[in-house]
Image (tube, rainbow, N blue to C red):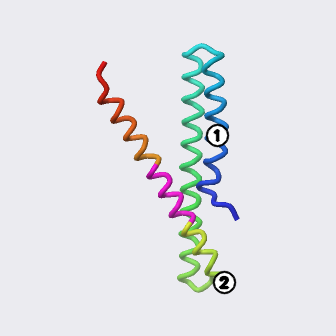
Amino acid sequence: MSIEGIGAINPSIALSGATGITRLGGSTPAASETSSATDFASVLSGGLEKLQATQSRADGLAVQAANGSLTDVHDYMIASTEASLATQLTVAVRNKALDAFNEIMRMQA
């Protein structure tokens, strides 16, 4: 079983980052900025959607565990841990992005 929240982000970022770097050298800046921004936005959006799906799955299994209809409790524990790790990863990425933004804003022109 793979961790959906983290496993989905890793290959996408590696491929998107590699193709974005290649495009920057071979095309005009305006065209590459637009396509890179679109790629980054789609990766970010896809990652957040995967996070939401992982959390929804964990919530559904929690309800089943509370009702007594869940036969394997370890399924809930795995889903809960996946959701927790995916949330921690998302928060860490957000914090790093905010730190980078704040550092850029402190630079002198």
Q: Residue 100 in the image: x percent, y percent? A: 40, 36
Q: Look at 59% across and 45% down and name the residue there.
A: 46
The image's mark for residue 53 is none
**Does 87 sit above or below residue 26?**
below
Q: Look at 29% across and 30% down and name the residue there.
A: 106
Q: How many marks?
A: 2
Q: Give the range drawn in magenta.
A: 82-92
Residue 40 location, quadrant? top right
Q: Mark 1 points at which residue?
A: 14
Amino acid of disc 2: Thr
Indicate left or right for 93 with 109 as reference.
right
Q: Look at 38% across and 41% down and name the residue there.
A: 98
Q: Does the magenta stretch include residue 84?
A: yes
Q: Residue 47 in the image: x percent, y percent? A: 57, 48
Q: Does the magenta stretch include residue 12?
A: no
Q: Name the residue under label 2.
A: 71
